[in-house]
Image: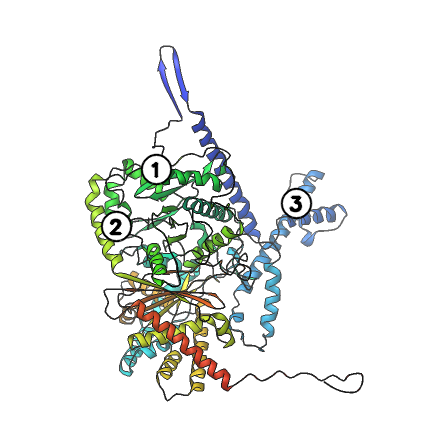
Amino acid sequence: MAEAHSAVAFSFAITHDGFDINYDHEVLNLVWNSGVRSWKKRVARARNGVRNGVYPAHIQSLWLISAIALGLHFAGYQAPFNLTNRVLVHLPSNTINWQVTACFVAALIVWLSICFTMRYTLKLLLMYKGWMYESRAPGSRVSVPTMLWVAVVRVLSSWNKPGLYSFQGSLPRLPLPSVEDTMRRYLRSVRPLLDDANYTRMEGLAKEFQQTIGKKLQWYLRLKSWWSTNYVSDWWEEYVYLRGRGPLCVNSNFYGTDAIFMNLTNKQAARAANVISLLLNFRRLIEHQELQPIMVQGMIPLCSWQYERTFNTARVPGLETDRIIHYRDSNHIVVLHKGCYYKMLIYYKGRILRPCELQVQIEDILKAKATPLEGEEHLAALTAWNRTKWADARNTYFSRGVNHVSLRTIESAAFVLSLDDEPFEFDLARPELLDNFGKKLLHGNGYNRWFDKCFTVCVANNGRVGFNAEHTWSDAAIASHMWENLIVDDLATDGYDESGNTKGTPEFQPPLPTRLSWDLKPCLTQIEEATIDVTKLINEVDLRILVHQEYGKGFMKKCRLSPDAYIQMALQLAYYRDAGRFSLTYEASMTRLFREGRTETVRPCTIESAAWVKAMQNSNTTNDERVKLLQDACDRHQLGYQDAMCGNGIDRHLFCLYVVSKYLEVDSPFLNEVLSEPWRLSTSQTPHGQTPKMDLKKHPNCISAGGGFGPVADDGYGVSYIIAGENLIFFHISAKTTCQQTNVHRFSENIVQALADIRSMFEQHMKDHPPKPKATSTKPLTNGSST
């Protein structure tokens, strides 16, 4: 293993004989290539900026309009509004050259007018959300306004091939709900959680808030909604994430797993090399804006703003608030192996290294017999520590010298790669193996993940992979898209030979990784304290990954219910049986139909869901009554989800009103109580199928088992699920072992039982009410008989 060494590009000395200049040609060449690469990216960004600015129009259409303007002028016809002549009078003369110039200026004015007309027409159309509420029941008809809207939007959105950020200027702003509507929705959502006395008290608080301070707070919030692009996202990022002082490990970061039903190679270095290469290809698609934006039903764009910080990003701790730092470019990653940190170049001799060349670098690290410096092995525990303590240690011990240089190397890396010296295992007959797989990704041993980094890729010694991601820079859907793209491409590219190594032969000897230098003796006490704290934290967390193969969305669709609503109702029944009561439930929904939208909360515990759960526990309720109550509960849940996606949720509006009240130093008993309510059941569905390249019919095993997160409340559950196929669902269930009321294994059994009970209920219903046979038309035959 090559040790780190200092390199000087050039040096000079003054002697009696004159100047003595020495320079390192290779280093200067690296500097030159880096500058060229930087300028190429600037030119590409400028070009994409112009393309996005005029989208959905084509840039090439400017030349067509210019040709038409020239033809009209020299044929003796006037351009629209006599633009050419109006421009010409302001030019120095009336020569042919200036006439041509006037034609081009007139064409430019007409072209820009058309561009912005198309753009703002699309923006006005995307404000319409009636399509969201159209019935999807079999046999139902779409309304005429929605059909007309679909036709126009489809034409405008497919007029030109979009780049990643092409729709950003056409996305509408997140609407601000009225205080009256939010109060009404809120009171309805808490009705099943409160007895009559407490509900009456809460009604009084809500009415008082609405009639007094709520009007003033709403007025300030309305100003913010007019002035800012999104009235929620910047405050959400600052106050929910960056101002949080608790450890990122378990409390904030989330994880994603490998495609557990397939194993492409058992060579750690080969899998790591291909994963690095595929991630860098994804980064290139983002940087060049060649990644296609996610389109709902193939025509309604989602906001792509969060992709910008996917790579080259780190969260930096502060004494009171953290900050996100995003580097425009990075030509290296940082590799963590057996407590040692390495800087590994990924760009060399004018191009990104190929997988076979990356594998040479990884093997060099794996073969190294280096031992960690004093304190180096447990260094990453600082990133899992209390944020204020970590900020204080950073300011004291990492603000200068080798520690500052090495820390900046980590934070400016494209991402961090952790080469674990243990396997990630999966066996249906031994479910504890998958549980341990998830735990290793959620928190590892507390110091083999750099929790401040945008994401850490974890590669086991048996070739399986996963990731741990910081939550501030994006929501899980963005990381899920990246990971889904990686898994599909890893299978499609067929990048491994028969022995499990990467295909291809290196064109040159790639630059060897270099060790990062540290001087950690002054901060050994802080590292030891952080290690103790994170060890205690991870020992208090239990995780269960449930593989449900009895049925999946195929049966749910036969029941004519939304799969998400179906699962949420199962979770409500399972929680009621587990805890003996209803609880405030959080389900994450996205608001990316709006510019810079992130998430909104859906509250699955409703009046209808509570009525159905009670009916399931009441033996006197008939099966038909239970089915009807479940259908009503799913319909109500769908309406809540639709409202949340359309900007008519409850919790983000209340959160922003609360922030305004704090700025104005106004106390609100209503907001104080609402914002302090614990989410004892926090749920989220992991999306999949975000890339059209995923074909589960052709490759049914090419799907990740999803991912998960830690419990939000100390006495609650964190549940993430992914509906992976027609007969497969993964549940990731977390809880604190210090709470006597929660148990992930008991809760997983309750989920399985709830899903089984719902299936039995519908099977009995289908048996009692078989579908009516479709009527067949009778056509006369030639001989006069009929069918």
- Label 2 sits on residue: 319
* Outermost residue toward the bottom in this view: 620
**Mark 3 falls on what kind of element?**
helix
Of residues 594 and 382, the one nearer the viewer is: 382
Quadrant (top left, top right, bottom left, bottom right) of the N terminus: top left
Image-quadrant location for residue 741:
bottom left
- What percent of the width, then of the height, locates residue 370? 30, 37
Which of label 3 and label 1 is nearer to you? 1
Q: Is residue 195 above or below residue 90?
A: below
Q: Residues within 10 Å of mark 2 (few under 14, many from 20)?
A: some
Of residues 163 and 93, the one nearer the viewer is: 163
- What percent of the width, then of the height, locates residue 251? 30, 59
Image-quadrant location for residue 604:
bottom left
Q: Is residue 766 left or right of residue 773?
A: left
Quadrant (top left, top right, bottom left, bottom right) of the C terminus: bottom right
- Label 3 sits on residue: 104
Of residues 634 and 473, the one nearer the viewer is: 634
Q: Residues within 10 Å of mark 1 (few under 14, many from 20)?
A: few
Q: Residue shown at 45%/86% (left/top)?
A: 624
**Mark 2 falls on what kind of element?**
loop
Q: Residue shown at 37%/48% (left/top)?
A: 461
Which of label 2 and label 3 is nearer to you? 2
Q: Is residue 781 left or right of residue 697?
A: right
* Residue 604 visible somewhere in the drawing: no
Please tell me the numbered disc located at residue 572.
Answer: none
- What percent of the width, then of the height, locates residue 273? 44, 44
Identity of the amino acid at label 2?
Leu
**Mark 1 falls on what kind of element?**
loop
Please tell me the numbered disc located at residue 368.
Answer: 1
Identity of the amino acid at label 1?
Ala
